[in-house]
Image: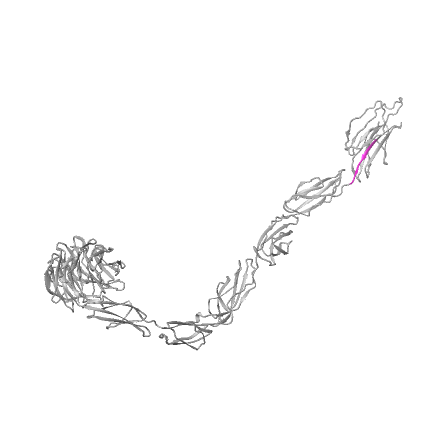
Amino acid sequence: MTPTLLDPHSHLPLESDVSFPSTGLRTLRSLAPLASGLAFLSLAALSGCGGGGGGSVPPPVLTSFTSARSPITRGTSTSLTAVFSNGAGQVDHGIGAVSTGTPVTVSPTQDTTYTLTVGNSQGTTVTGKVAVRVVAPPETPVVAAPARVTAGQGGYTASVPDQPGCAYAWTVTGATVTAGDGTASLTFTPVAAGQVNLSCVVTNAAGTASTAGTATSAIVAPPVLPVVSAPALVTAGQGGYLASVPVQAGSTYAWTVTGATVQAGAATDTLTFTPGTSGSVTLSCVVTNAAGTASQAGGATLGIVAPPATPVVTAPAYVTADQAGYTASIPAQAGCTYAWSITGGTLIAGQQTPTVAFTPGATGTVQLGCVVTNAAGTASAPGTAAPAIVPPPAITAFAASPSSVVVGSGSVLSYAFSGGTGTLDQGIGGVTSGGTTNISPSASTAYILTVTNAAGTRVAATTSLTVTVPPAPVIEGFKALPATLTQGQGTLLTFTFSDGTGVLDQGIGPVASGGTVAVSPSADTTYTLTVTNAIGVATTASVTVTVKSFVSKFVYVANGGGGISGFTLDDATGDLTTLAGSPYDPSAPVLHVASDPQGRFLLAVNGDGVTNVNTLSIYQIDGTTGDLTPVASNPTVATGTDPWCAAVDPTGQFVYVRCDGAISSYRLNPANGLLTPLATVPTAGGSGDLVLHPSGKYLFTVGRTSDRLEVFDLDPATGALTPEGSPYVLPSGTGPLGLALSQTGEYLFTKGEGASGGPAVIGSVFGYHVDITTGGLTPLGALITGLEGADAYHGLTFNPAQSVLYGAFETAAYDAAAWSFSPSAGAMTPVAGSPYAWFGGNGSDQVVLSRNGKWALLLDYNGQQLAVGRVDPVTGALAFKAYAGVELFPVSATVVGVLQ
């Protein structure tokens, strides 16, 4: 059999030509590796093969035939070593004989199988083969790698061409190998800076290493997210807008644009673009570094606004020199700003608004300009206007002659002006400077001359001229209050008129509308009021004051201790005669008596000043005998608490009773004396006198405990009372009880009595001027009488025919006093003989004068007497006449008579 040698590298069998006999054959079943790395397998024929005699030659033995290296690199050598015996060895391929165990060097250039033949002298041979594989030497590898890589970015590769059967050894600095180490393709991640150094050595199967192939990759920074800088707003269709990102060295830029057209710079850090017509512009930029690494896209969105329109300036064609208040305007453009300019004038307001106010200069033109800028900052072309400056109009003369005319007569208007055209109103129309116009107004008329310049200015050149046609004067009211007097008594003339000046005859002279004049005619007198207007037209009104003689007939006395005493009074002599029925109702205490103006009824307030009876009695007066008869219908009516006095209005329709804190009111039936209660009106606290103004318009009253004086308006139709403002406050503790009006009704007086039941005090008289129009009172101040007294119940009286005031004094060393009153000075002066002690200073509660002012009655409260005195017709002084007895505690009296 032929032994087989195996090449451990090629795994190809090596054939042996040695034949072994079957007898004694021993087979090698093991393969042993050689030191050179070859595996040699020998199958040897043991001795004894082939038979023969004792002279036989031993067969050749091939122990091993190996190559020191395989494969080998072309151009290098290896050695073959044969170990054999019992023969001679021979190697082919020109090597020839070899000695056992002696290496021979071979340098094959290609894969070669060497055959060793060992033969003995008998021609017996054994062969062995060994293959030497020849591989190409490794080439220096060409390293392919990126020229630039991005720091920290993985996935980069470096490679060399594949050389089959070779191994690859990489050396890398500046990067981290992530895969492929030992292969022809390497994956790596660059570090943060510098460069990546790549080196690769290729080793073939024979272990020959190439020269190292190298490459470097520059490490560049990764790109930064670009921040796009661009305007927030852009103008539609306007070119030249720029958008930019910060420069990143060595990088490229890629822009993406919607809503706009790119003009330039799409691959640079600065883009030039033109926005579209509406909506918005979207910009996006990606930055790629030198290594080809792209950033995230940076972006911006820009609003597109319309381009501003060239403004159309609206302004006057003409303006007046130096006149403020002109305006110019343009249509507003949403979201825009405005910038005005002016020459030839001054801007005074609105420079940044669509409307500007300006004042022209003196001459020439005003050059106005306005530029509109939209929200994107795009400015329009300027809009302009150029108003011409004209001088202001002026009126140098405008007059009417005459300026006041009577209806039907004429006047002439004359005028002179410059700087414009003139127009007269009232239907006259255009006029020429220096001309005249005839007019004939039917009423007062204002004529307006207007001169208007080309700019329309007329306010500064407008003048009004009134040609007066005065209205006829009108007398709205003229009357005497009262219109019927007792001889010596006074009255008030009141008058209202308009459209003229007033004059009263009878020596009175000029008067003003709404005024009053006090007169005291001695006989029936007609007063004429003449009112004349500015051109002499007059109107008149007259009022007749009837003066009658009052003849005293009866005297009635209220006795606090019981009933009413009655007397006849001889008006010629002053003699008193007791009436047949006197005293009347002697069991009834009476505090006050009063009669109606016609002398038909007597009113008696029941009470004594201490005990409150709270009733009012009414009696029919017999005009012949003076006897009193209680009225049949209702002789007594209830009043408020603590009634003090009663009064009848000048028309005889209404009766008023002052009570504590109220006034009881009644309507008086003139036919039967029936009293019908009306509303009760509250007053300030306390009781006191009340008096009615002769005009019938006002009621005055005082309250003792409240120290208040009050005025009430009197409705002549209903008798209703309405407070006239707030009460007038007297000094605390005054204790007013008496109240008196002057003979003309122009002045009002009250006297203090101190506290009820208190000690005697020095009395003070307080005077007031009465406004006949309103009823308001103006204080005249207080007169300190210097006379002591207290509790004179009705202690103040004014002479009905003279300007003299009388006062009664109770619990005093005198009984009465008299003062002359000067209206002009507002002062009071004691008359001759005052004060009077007719009763020896016993004291009195009231001084009463007859209506004609001839006789004075004085009541002796403590002595139950009635004194009669004559009144001096010039001074008002009182002269003693006679006495008559009355009932207990006389406190009030009244004189009833007839007018003739």
**Is 720 placed left or right of 23 in the picture?**
left
Magenta run includes residue 789: no
What x and y, as percent, mark residue 808? 15, 61
Most frequent secondary structure within the magenta stretch: strand
Which is nearer the eye, 217 or 823? 823
What x and y, as percent, mark residue 185? 70, 42
State which quadrant residue 714 falls in: bottom left
Observer able to see residue 102 = no
Colour basis? one colour
Which is nearer the eye, 451 or 236? 451
**Is 384 placed left or right of 295 in the picture?**
left
* Quadrant of image for the C terminus: bottom left
Question: Which residue of the protein is positioned furthest toward the top in this rendering?
Answer: 53
Magenta stretch, residue numbers: 128-136
The total of numbered circles placed on residues is 0
* Quadrant of image for the N terminus: top right
Observer able to see residue 769 = yes
What x and y, as percent, mark residue 99? 84, 32
State which quadrant residue 677 falls in: bottom left
What x and y, as percent, mark residue 533? 32, 72
**Is 192 placed left or right of 646 in the picture?**
right
